[in-house]
């Protein structure tokens, strides 16, 4: 448990916030590198990226506002922003909406999903280190890579009853970091093989939705209904939509061998 990573002039820099910022910077670097590689970089894309980041941050906070409002004796907007939780699923939904709205505002009509997909995957792989170092670890496990913590560290981890028992737990965030790192490589491999504009992002979102639904069983988040967490209930509504999208588009050949076409990616 490392709530504070370092100090700058006596001011503590939170571990979680630092890695979130690092993840956003990594995602932006990949986004604009990919835009330059595809020769589509322009000022409009800067606004699209900014709108996505801002809306992602707002929705990440807003999607967990109900927890803060239920616990805070005197709730306020400042308290919500400083003390409220954050949801990566809410952040992704907000980032998607932010990109869509900003594109309409600036008049950018081209698909941007292929730019966002590898960028988001790498940003998540980096940002999740902040979660691993500061948040609930996972459910108990007998697997050899289970992690246990001392009573002193356990006292600093919120909402982690298994931490206090000294039991070995699933390193659930390490699972997620590994998933996003693999997806980053897979998306780069798929880049010349998928010809439908914007398809890479939908592939990534479906893969992450399925993975996240599964990993929630070892995350240790409280069950909301029928043994499922709030994240799983949200995914129950989004996974069918993504599956339906690919099912409806199956007659159209959207994929090609890397050397089968001379078309630009």
Image (spheres, helix red, strand yellow):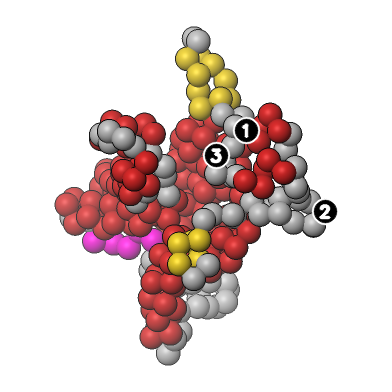
- Write the start and end of the magenta stretch as one range: 109-113
Q: Is residue 183 visible?
A: no
x, y percent for residue 114 = 42, 61
Q: Quadrant of the C terminus?
A: bottom left
Q: Is residue 254 left or right of residue 73?
A: right
Q: Secondary structure at mark 2?
A: loop
Chief SS of the magenta region: loop
Residue 139 visible? The answer is: yes
Residue 252 x, y percent position in the rendering: 41, 86
Left/right of residue 156 with respect to residue 46 in the rendered view: right
* Residue 193 placement (x, y as % from top left): 53, 71
Residue underneath mark 2? 144
- Front residue of 41/24: it is 24
The residue that label 1 is drawn on is 155
Mark drawn on residue 244:
none
Q: Quadrant of residue 84?
A: top left
- Please name whichever residue, 192 or 202, is drawn nearer the observer in this view of the structure: 202
User: What number is the disc on residue 158?
Assistant: 3
| Residue at (58% x, 66% y) in the render | 214
Q: Residues within 10 Å of mark 2 (few under 14, many from 20)?
A: few
Q: Secondary structure at mark 3?
A: loop
**Residue shown at 34% from the left, 45% from the top:** 70
Whether the residues at callouts 3 and 2 have beta carbons within 8 Å, the answer is no
The outermost residue toward the right is 144
Q: Is residue 31 magenta?
A: no
Between residue 92 and residue 77, name the one nearer to us. 77
> Looking at the picture, how far across and down is residue 161, in whole percent?
62, 46
Nearest to N terminus: mark 2 or mark 1: 2
| 184 is higher (above) or lower (below) than 24 | below
Q: Secondary structure at mark 1?
A: loop
Q: Tell me which residue sits at (48%, 38%) in the image.
A: 20
């Amino acid at each position: 448990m490392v709530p504070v990573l370092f100090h700058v002039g006596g001011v503590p820099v939170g571990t979680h916030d630092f890695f979130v910022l690092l993840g956003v910077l990594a995602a932006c670097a990949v986004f604009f590198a990919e835009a330059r590689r595809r020769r589509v970089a322009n000022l409009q894309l800067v606004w699209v990226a900014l709108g996505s980041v801002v809306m992602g941050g707002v929705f990440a906070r807003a999607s967990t506002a109900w927890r803060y409002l239920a616990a805070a004796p005197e709730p306020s907007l400042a308290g919500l922003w400083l003390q409220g939780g954050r949801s990566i699923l809410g952040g992704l939904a907000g980032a998607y909406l932010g990109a869509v709205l900003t594109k309409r505002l600036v008049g950018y009509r081209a698909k941007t999903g292929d730019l966002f997909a590898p960028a988001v995957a790498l940003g998540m792989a980096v940002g999740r280190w902040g979660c691993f170092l500061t948040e609930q670890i996972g459910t108990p496990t007998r697997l050899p890579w289970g992690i246990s913590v001392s009573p002193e560290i356990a006292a600093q981890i919120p909402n982690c009853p298994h931490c206090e028992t000294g039991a070995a737990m699933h390193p659930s965030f390490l699972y997620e970091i590994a998933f996003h790192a693999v997806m980053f490589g897979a998306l780069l491999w798929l880049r010349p093989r998928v010809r439908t504009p914007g398809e890479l992002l939908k592939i990534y979102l479906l893969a992450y939705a399925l993975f996240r639904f599964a990993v929630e069983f070892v995350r240790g988040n409280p069950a909301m209904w029928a043994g499922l967490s709030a994240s799983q209930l949200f995914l129950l509504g989004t996974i069918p939509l993504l599956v339906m999208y690919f099912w409806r588009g199956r007659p159209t050949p959207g994929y090609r061998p890397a050397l089968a076409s001379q078309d630009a990616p």
